[in-house]
Image: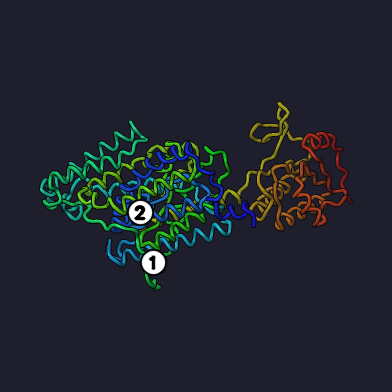
Amino acid sequence: MTLQSLARWLPFLKWPRPDRHLLKGEFWAGMTVGLMLVPQGVAYAALAGMPLVTGIYASLIPALVAVLFSSSTRLGVGPTALTSLLIGASLTGLAEPGSAQWVALAAWMALLSGLLQMVMGMARFGWLLNLVTSPVLNGFTQAAALLILGSQLAALTGLRAADWGALLSTPSPGLFDLTAAGFGLGSLALLMLARRGLPQFPAAIVVVGAAGALSWALGYADAGGAVVGALPSGLPAPYWPGALPWSSFSALVMPVLVVTLVSFLETASSAKVESQRSKEQWNENQDLIGQGLAKISSGLCGSFATSASFSRSAINLYAGAKTGWATLFAISLVLVVLLWLTPALYHVPQSVLAAVVVTAVTSLIKPGTLLRLWRVSRVEAVIGGVTFALTLATAPRMYWGVLVGLLMNLSHFLYQRLHPRIIEVGLHPDGSLRDRHLWQLPPLAPRLLALRMDAELDFASASALERRVTEHLAAHPEVVHLCLLSQPINRIDVTGVETFAQLLAQMELRGGTLHLSGLKLPVEQVLRQAGLLELRPGLAMYRTDAEALVALQQLPEPVPRA
């Protein structure tokens, strides 16, 4: 096996040989991302209902596996807000957050989702992800961002009550931990200002470190304040979640499918930006394999499913990362934190972690998206709006929003395929062939029906074409010529061949002619194999529309057959 063929499955073999200049730039880019990765990993673990240290576990080995086996080497792989929210919402009601059963179910979600992605990549099924359109993804993302914000408000403001109902029934300042609110809201303000003024600066680790130091100085933990607490040091031990009962497996099927879909769409959004910058074609199948292996490794570390963070990937690119070496430096920083610096996180208030999450997800909220979509396509805007509403209404089982949006989108696609655009053409004064009725043009020739169908001639569109021709011929018995402008027809199937044969027989029965203009080679080959393009009086073929136009305008008056 040659090195080139081996590098197809092991993309890291194609990395450039490092030199001093390259490693210097990669080091600083990696440090920038690594300083963001640690606080975000801990915060997203809390969002997923997992032990906080598992967020650091998910930022270590899975990120290493992803960068070694993915074609996109500059993605910030690790915990993300959307995936963490999906995990936490999907497991609600199945186990107690943070319990051993919860961890086992989250690990199974990572294993099953990773296995599905890996199989899809090896089978070259990356094209299936194109079924999820931008309106569906935007509707889900907007709703998920609002749900994330709602889930973090209590921790951000230091609300001591179990839910907001107690605050509404008996509002009182005593229900809030004012110190926690100060930490949370102050950190949120600093992070938002830093994101606007210094987007490349790793403000998260600075704010988290400063908040931890201030919390220690004030004795906030000793006073009973909610802090991160003790985190275990050292590398994660190998973990096996145990047998998965059938009842739990059936409950995880839909969440696993949605996590697989959403997490890779997150990856796709970042990978497309990277491919545009590098001017290289994106290999979605290899990224499926790499992301799938990363999820599997995360589950075997006792952690939860990972994905590619758009914000961290963007920071990596802006910081000047050129290869996967930057990710290796970021992972090295995470390793240092995990081995020796986890005690430094003890005094960090949990409200500060909530501020980190809120800052990350506010960039996902774009209220003008659906309004802009409405101006482009009202149907797709409705699909995005329904996805948004159902995601909010069905929380925590919010995967129903994606599934219903996907079903609506496929139904809209099938409706368009079953109702193709078929127009009768006429000669415009500028010399082009256009919709005769829209532009109020005369027929190309007397006793002629000239049609153009902007679709493939297959099982979905064939009946529409046959119905259009049959209805016109029934309403205009004098028509004896049918011209099909075939340039837009790229493909034909068995149903299309049968429809073509029926149209040809129908015109021959009327004593007329079927004219074909601009028939493409793949369609022509299929029709010739079916024996329908043999020379006969009722069939005429032209290579171009100009040639067909000249011939049609010289048609003699037809002589009726006996």
Observer-nearest residue: 493 or 183? 183
User: Could you tell me the amino acid type at mark 2?
Assistant: Ser
Q: Which residue is mark 1?
A: 251
Residue at x 68%, y 44% (from the top left corner): 453
Which quadrant of the rendered structure holds the N terminus? bottom right
Residue at x 68%, y 51% (from the top left corner): 467
Q: How is the image coloured?
A: rainbow
Task: Residue 432: give x, y in percent of width and height.
Answer: 71, 31
In the displayed structure image, the side of residue 361 where residue 257 appears, left or right: right
Observer-nearest residue: 344 or 493? 344
Task: Residue 421: give x, y in percent of width and height.
Answer: 63, 44
Q: Which residue is mark 2?
A: 84
Task: Residue 520: give x, y in percent of width and height.
Answer: 75, 45
Residue at the limit of the structure toward the front, as seen here: 20
In the displayed structure image, the side of residue 346 where residue 2 appears, left or right: right
User: Could you tell me the amino acid type at mark 1?
Assistant: Ala
Residue 411 is at least partly visible in this image: no
Query: Is residue 410 shown above or below 21?
Result: below
Q: Secondary structure at mark 1?
A: helix
Considering only order in the chain, which callout, 2 or 1, is on the residue closer to the N terminus? 2
